[in-house]
Amino acid sequence: MTEFTYRLPQKRRIATDIPGPRSTEWEIRRRAAVAAGLASSVPVFAVDADGGVIVDVDGNSLIDLGSGIAVTTVGASHTLVAAAVADQAARFTHTCFMVTPYDGYVRVAEELANLTPGEHEKRSVLFNSGAEAVENAVKIARLATGRSAVVAFDHAYHGRTNLTMALTAKAMPYKSQFGPFAPEIYRMPGSYPFRDEPGLSGAEAARRAIARIEKQIGADSVAALVYEPIQGEGGFIVPAEGFLPALSVWARANGVVFIADEVQTGFARTGDWFACDHEGVVPDLITTGKGIAGGMPLAAVTGRADLLDAVHPGGLGGTYGGNPVACAAALATLEFMRESDLPARAREIEERVVPRLRELAREIETIGEVRGRGAMLAIELVRPGSNEPDAELAKAVVSEALSHGVIALTCGTYGNIIRLLPPLVISDELLADALDVLEAALRARSAARVLAFES
Ligand code: PLZ
């Protein structure tokens, strides 16, 4: 593997209980000052982070299998990113691109044109968050097509703003009581091989969705389809092969804008630059964010020049979108990703993790499926002897792993999926150590679960 360099020791170290006394103390202050609606999945306060570790205020060094939800692909303090940020901040932190443009923004747009799928002429517009990017992709698609309906899918996650809540599938915690939601959003079945009827092919799943779209909305009313090529929050769902190509062919034939939401899957994470690349799908618009800028807030809509240029001057924007410091971080991040071939590193991680977890799945009956691509991998947990989702087990395993110093996140419509999103710069040794911890937690908690169901 590529040798990465680190500032902090790449070792798991447990110094106190987790959370330790200082995290517990800070948590009290937090509760008095921070809104309760903002929950944190890991109850420790971070003071330092580098490569594959996060150091907490009690001196625990935790292995990071979450990357702050797929953001710190190059680590949380990569030296090149930190230097680019410091250098840009020393020159100017902000002018507002809508007032006085700067070169970093243009260079990020050039990078996006080169890296995203397809050789056609492209344009980009930059934003602060994934939700903002998705929302703007929909604005662009509606204006360019003169149509208003937007199709989203089961298990989708696209954000927490009003329009993106409407696109997101799961009520709790994202939507419940936050309505009314934006109109003209229609939800269709996608492709979830583990839970679809056995043997349903990608092409058949696409036909199922298309038939409903044509019946319930009418193709000529549809501005856009929005799909995450691997659904993230909804459960790391890799659609059956052929599903995405069939959907994109139908979209093209019907003048429907195919928007790939690659906010979570993008930038080397899945073993290619984008998840669409695995099946050669070329979206009309692609939304990106998270991993693009080494932890700085940046997101983008990139796509067909004719669509983006259809919007009147002033129709798109925002005070901070494409902030110069975030752009500098992105340029350093992308250069490092390219030079160290991080897509290949993601494939290496898949090779190290997947066979091991599949082996374990043969032994442990509560593992329903191990799936994913590159360093976007998941374990779907079920009740013994069934396909019933087991969210409680997922929670228990993650909490046990945390008590031994490994941060892993859950996800899924049913909350029963453990997702692995390590920084791609994690060392093989640290990854192996994290897997040992996770395996022990899976064995222990699954055994307890089987016993509980037997009695
Ligand atoms: N599209 C595919 O995964 C963000 C959300 C965490 P923002 N996913 C993490 C949470 O509970 O808020 C995401 C995504 C996809 C859009 C978004 C939204 O990106 O940067 O969080 O707005």
Image: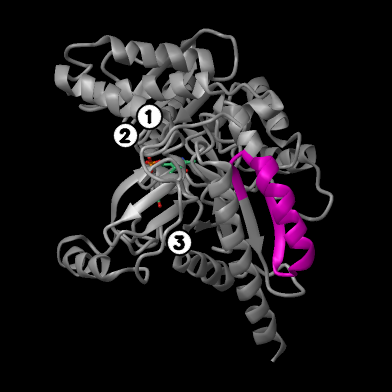
Secondary structure found at label 1: helix
Determine if residue 94 is in view: no
User: In the rendered structure, which disc, 2 or 3, sits on the residue that comes first in sequence?
Assistant: 2
**Which percent across, then down, holds residue 359?**
77, 57
Q: Kindly indicate whether the residue at mark 2 contacts the one at mark 1 (C-beta within 8 angstroms).
A: yes
Mark 2: C-beta under 8 Å from nearest atom of ligand 1: yes
Q: Nearer the viewer, mark 3 or mark 1?
A: 3
Task: Specify the quadrant that holds the C terminus.
Answer: bottom right
| Three-letter residue code for mark 2 | Pro
* Residue on which the image places disc 2: 297
Q: Separation of disc 1 and disc 2 at Cα?
A: 7 Å
- The residue sitting at 30% across, 47% down in the picture is 48
Task: Specify the quadrant that holds the N terminus.
Answer: top right
| Three-letter residue code for mark 3 | Gly
* Residue on which the image places disc 3: 405
Instruction: Specify few, some or many for label 1: CA neighbours under 10 Å numbering under 14, 14-19, or 20 or more.
Output: many
**Which percent across, then down, holds residue 4?**
49, 32
- Checking the image for residue 12, the label placed there is none
User: In the rendered structure, which disc, 3 or 1, sits on the residue that comes first in sequence?
Assistant: 1
Q: Which one is nearer the viewer's eye here, 338 or 144?
A: 338
Residue range of the region highlighted in magenta in the rendering = 349-377
Q: Separation of disc 2 and disc 3 at Cα?
A: 27 Å
Instruction: Specify few, some or many for label 3: CA neighbours under 10 Å numbering under 14, 14-19, or 20 or more.
Output: many
Q: Is residue 19 above or below residue 307?
A: below
* Residue on which the image places disc 1: 293
Q: Which one is nearer the viewer's eye here, 434 or 298?
A: 434
Q: Separation of disc 3 and disc 1 at Cα?
A: 27 Å
